[in-house]
Amino acid sequence: MKNMVYFCQNCGYESSKWMGQCPGCREWNTFAEEPVAKKSTKSSVAGFPGRTGHAKATLLKDVDSATEERISSGIPEFDRVLGGGIVKGALMLIGGDPGIGKSTLLLQVTNNLAKSGKKVLYVSGEESLRQIKMRSERLGSDFTDVSVLCETNLSDITECIAAEKPEIVIIDSIQTMYREDISSAPGSVSQVREATSILMQTAKQQEISIFIVGHVTKEGAVAGPRVLEHMVDTVLYFEGDRHASYRILRGVKNRFGSTDEIGVFEMRSEGLKEVPNPSEFMLNGRAENSSGSVISCSMEGTRPVMLEIQALVCNSNFGIPRRQTTGMDFNRVNLLMAVVEKRGGLQIGNQDAYVNIAGGIKVSEPALDLAAVMALISSFRNKAVDPKTVIFGEVGLSGEIRAVNQAEQRVLEAKKLGFKTVILPKANLNDNLKKITGIELVGVSDIREAMQIPMG
């Protein structure tokens, strides 16, 4: 017998009736009706390989706490984001815009793993065998050791996994997978949730590392219920403009490593290539001696990345000044402009302001506040900041410059790239920083001190 229930398309909240606002995520008009078939307990248990139906508890002291064995993907940038490599039995989700390179990256990873002697199964629900073959030929590598399955029925896929016994499985994509005993369409909340649950059981019980590809919505989140991200061990997002050459792989959840690491790739005709030095890549082609351009340093996990913050301040032709940001939080820029006007004494509240982080990277770190402020002031005064100067620091509402973490790594990265001066919070000027030679350190305690520093 089938029951009709309502699911929130955003978070997966289940209700017996339609509601305008979801009680779970507080979003409006997200409920959709889906049929759900009742399943017996026996069939559910039998659907998972290795399940006996009997649960047995284990004392925590009897659990082997040895270091998890990790498998190298052959791509150091990919391994960095994963926390050092692929963990056995992990379920990993990769999301990104269409055409960003998710399937290309995983196909390259699959090829590297197969060449290293690992048994890999690539399951595609979106492409035929001929299409996958054509794409592998475009990448210019020999994919003869990769096993490929074109199937969307989850029962057939789990049977193939049980028969082939691969070490790594790629599912492309989770929105195309379906279970026969659920009558809703593939990609619906119930189908995505059940498919992920089965794959999770397969990964844990058979010690198979599984990557699943997830489509994203127009807001940039993985399509389907939010519970999908809670079920998996690792969530990676592939960011960047598909019309540009750069790609950024960012970890937003990782049970086996840090979530602050990023991997930078460049899309070429032969596939994705690593960018070992993102700072040089982000600063490539910048215009020197141009007002409104400031170099700052952001920490992405353990890696310092130099960024160019661009600002354009001009007279407004309308009653309400226009604000636009790319790469930085819109509300944060509005706050910084208010601080500059109130604490710095510059009348920029009636000006149009545009702020951009070159390279397309998105940064939420407050350490870029001072650089954004100096870029706005530079554009407003039409005076260029010295191109050999790096600026970082958090700006408070009183105009004070607060200390940031890992200042020493930021200064060393600036020195390595040939910068001559670093403007940083005075609170960060400790003995370790003062020992660094070959670069001038200028400490400031508020934005008025920063504004008095000669710009060029």
Image: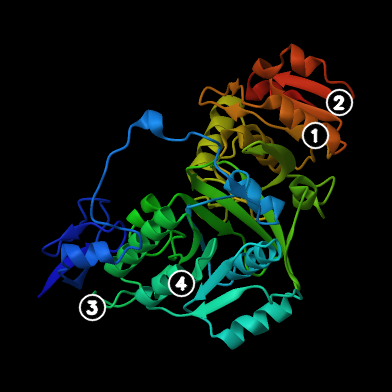
Q: CA distance from mark 2 to mark 3?
A: 66 Å
User: Can you give x and y, in whole percent of width and height, for residue 290 in the image?
Assistant: 80, 47
Name, please, the residue furthest toward the right: 438
Tell me if mark 1 has few (under 14), some (14-19) or many (20+) residues whose alpha carbon lies within 10 angstroms of its own.
many
Q: Which mark is residue 414?
A: 1
Please indicate, yes or no, whether residue 262 appears anywhere in the rendered image: no
Q: Earlier in the sequence, mark 4 or mark 3?
A: 4
Q: Earlier in the sequence, mark 2 or mark 4?
A: 4
The C terminus - image quarter: top right
Q: Which residue is mark 3?
A: 183
User: Can you give x and y, in whole percent of width and height, for residue 187 in the image?
Assistant: 35, 72
Q: Are marks 2 and 4 in contact (CB under 8 Å)?
A: no
Q: Earlier in the sequence, mark 2 or mark 3?
A: 3
User: Can you give x and y, in whole percent of width and height, for residue 205 in the image?
Assistant: 40, 55
Which SS class for mark 2?
loop
Q: Earlier in the sequence, mark 3 or mark 1?
A: 3
User: Can you give x and y, in whole percent of width and height, for residue 448 in the image?
Assistant: 66, 22
> Horizontal placement of 260 versus 269: left or right?
left
In this rendering, is residue 106 above or below 131? above
> Horizontal placement of 407 versus 89: left or right?
right
Which SS class for mark 4?
helix
Q: Earlier in the sequence, mark 2 or mark 1?
A: 1
Q: Which residue is mark 4?
A: 163
Tell me if mark 2 has few (under 14), some (14-19) or many (20+) residues whose alpha carbon lies within 10 angstroms of its own.
some
Tell me if mark 3 has few (under 14), some (14-19) or many (20+) residues whose alpha carbon lies within 10 angstroms of its own.
some
Which SS class for mark 3?
loop
Q: CA distance from mark 1 to mark 4?
A: 54 Å
Q: Are marks 2 and 1 in contact (CB under 8 Å)?
A: yes
> Is 330 or 174 nearer to us in this picture?
174
> Horizontal placement of 305 versus 175: left or right?
right
Type of amino acid at the residue the image marks with label 1: Ala
